[in-house]
Amino acid sequence: MATQSELNNETELGGAEVADFRRRVAEFLEANCSRAGDRSGTVGGEDPEGVATAKAFQRAMVDTGLAGLTFPTEFGGAGLTSRHQELFNREVQGWYLPNMPLSISHGMCLPMLNQFGTPEQKARFMPDNISGTSIWCQMFSEPGAGSDVAGLSTRATRDGDEWIIEGQKVWTSGAHYCDYGILVARTDSSMPKHKGLTMFIVDMRQEGVEVRPLRQISGGSGFNEVFFTEARVPADWQLGDLGQGWNLAVSMLMFERVSIGAGGGSGFNADRSPGLISAAQALGHGDDPVLRQGLADLWIREQIKGYIGQRIRAAVAAGRVPGPEGSLAKLNGSLLARRVRDVSMAIAGSAAQAWDAEDAEGSRWATGCLSTAGISIAGGTDEVQRNIIGERVLGLPKEPDPYKGVAWESIPRS
Ligand SMILES: Cc1cc2nc3c(=O)[nH]c(=O)nc-3n(C[C@H](O)[C@H](O)[C@H](O)COP(=O)(O)OP(=O)(O)OC[C@H]3O[C@@H](n4cnc5c(N)ncnc54)[C@H](O)[C@@H]3O)c2cc1C
């Protein structure tokens, strides 16, 4: 958690500076975004049109000096403080930002590059990542390694100045439109499972990488299977030290949990209450007392989410990687998503079941409802977050591990 002095340092902005920044954001939103209505937090955008829209939107962010707000200017960021990020997040409430396809790129891969990249990696990759010129994905999960991601079996073998990657990932969000990915692979099977892992930057456009989209219950194809057959990674695209992949993976998961659960202004993270309040009014439910109570409850919980996020972002801005508070944020975000689903369904009524064929966005209520379950799974399930909070926050005993300290190659696998 951020200390009080970190929070104080981060909040010292003059009144004129605050007003000027808010005006700049407000003008940008007027010119480039639509009012959220009931669309804030809309999932999807994984089709080519959605990706092109997200890229154009991000270029506009760059032109206005709002892209990569808290990242250094020398690597393409705006070089501002987490207080600016906080102001930005508040200002975008009630607006729909069409940047969902960039969520992982910016919420997880960018902070990893910034925190762990070499100066050469930062100079090479961060500017294009921030501008949306290149889009990035995260490749951790495998068919046999989800919650127990340290048990993964994709291999990286050194070959001269390169690594050769063999294996399979699954549930890779956005891999079908991404240029680069951050991958964790096993570099030493003779070590215990958490120790023989290394993290790499992978060129997703090369021949040895095959991406196969998966069809979801919501009708979309947001995530993929990714197969590596002699895929190649230059040795200097290794992220962090050899054998340190688990530590980096934990950091990336914490960035993911913060990104999903701590309030970041758009995507899964968007505050939904402003849009839902307008939708309830537009559909004639503005006076329904039960619905009003549900919306007020949601609004209050979203403010709390914002405060959790403020603390975590201040700690990150002070140079620290988020710790178990990321799990608190993620679990809270997932519980909040279920409340959003229930209130949304109450507002939409029959429109959630059947809609006018002419209405291009008619399916949004149903899609939003069906996508909610995924939020409790992505980035580590609710059960896994509860385990982490139990062990690392409450100090409860660790889960027993019969294979602790045993070489990965000696652990039985199905
Ligand atoms: C929308 C979405 C997007 C995703 N995007 C990505 C992505 O971009 N990149 C990526 O690498 N992965 C991604 N994932 C995968 C996600 O990280 C995994 O699905 C998740 O970690 C769970 O792994 P699993 O599906 O293998 O389930 P399992 O690990 O097999 O878990 C099955 C069930 O057992 C429970 N369980 C497992 N272990 C324990 C335990 N120790 N204690 C208590 N209960 C336990 C789980 O909570 C769950 O209910 C995504 C998933 C979703 C839903």
Image (cartoon, rainbow, N blue to C red):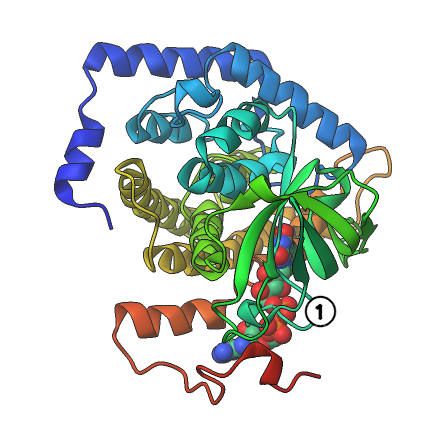
Q: Nearer the viewer, residue 90 or 177?
A: 177
Rendered image quadrant of residue 279: top right
Give how far across and how far down residue 233 sits, in percent. Answer: 67, 45
Residue lying at 78% horizontally and 48% vertically, measured from the top left: 220
Residue lying at 42% horizontally and 18% vertically, measured from the top left: 74
Rendered image quadrant of residue 168: bottom right
Residue lying at 86% horizontally and 38% vertically, measured from the top left: 357
Q: Is residue 373 visible?
A: no
Rendered image quadrant of residue 283: top right
Within 8 Å: ligand 1 and the Cβ of disc 1?
Answer: yes
- Left of 143 or right of it: where is 265? left
Give how far across and how far down residue 100 sits, in percent. Answer: 62, 37
- Left of 271 or right of it: where is 397? left
Q: Nearer the viewer, residue 381 or 395?
A: 395
Give how far across and how far down residue 289 sits, in percent. Answer: 44, 50
What residue is disc 1 on? Answer: 143
Residue lying at 43% horizontally and 58% vertically, measured from the top left: 247
Give how far across and how far down residue 269 sits, in percent. Answer: 49, 43
Indicate whether 31 appears above or below 143.
Answer: above
Q: Is residue 371 visible?
A: yes
Q: Nearer the viewer, residue 314 or 374?
A: 314
Which quadrant would the C terminus be assigned to in this image? Answer: bottom right
Q: Nearer the viewer, residue 89 or 116?
A: 116
- Left of 36 or right of it: where is 319? left
* Residue lying farthest to the front in this orientation: 160
Indicate whether 394 appears above or below 320.
Answer: below
Q: Amino acid at mark 1?
A: Pro
Ligand 1 image-quadrant field: bottom right
Determine the secondary structure under disc 1.
loop
- Left of 84 or right of it: where is 177? right
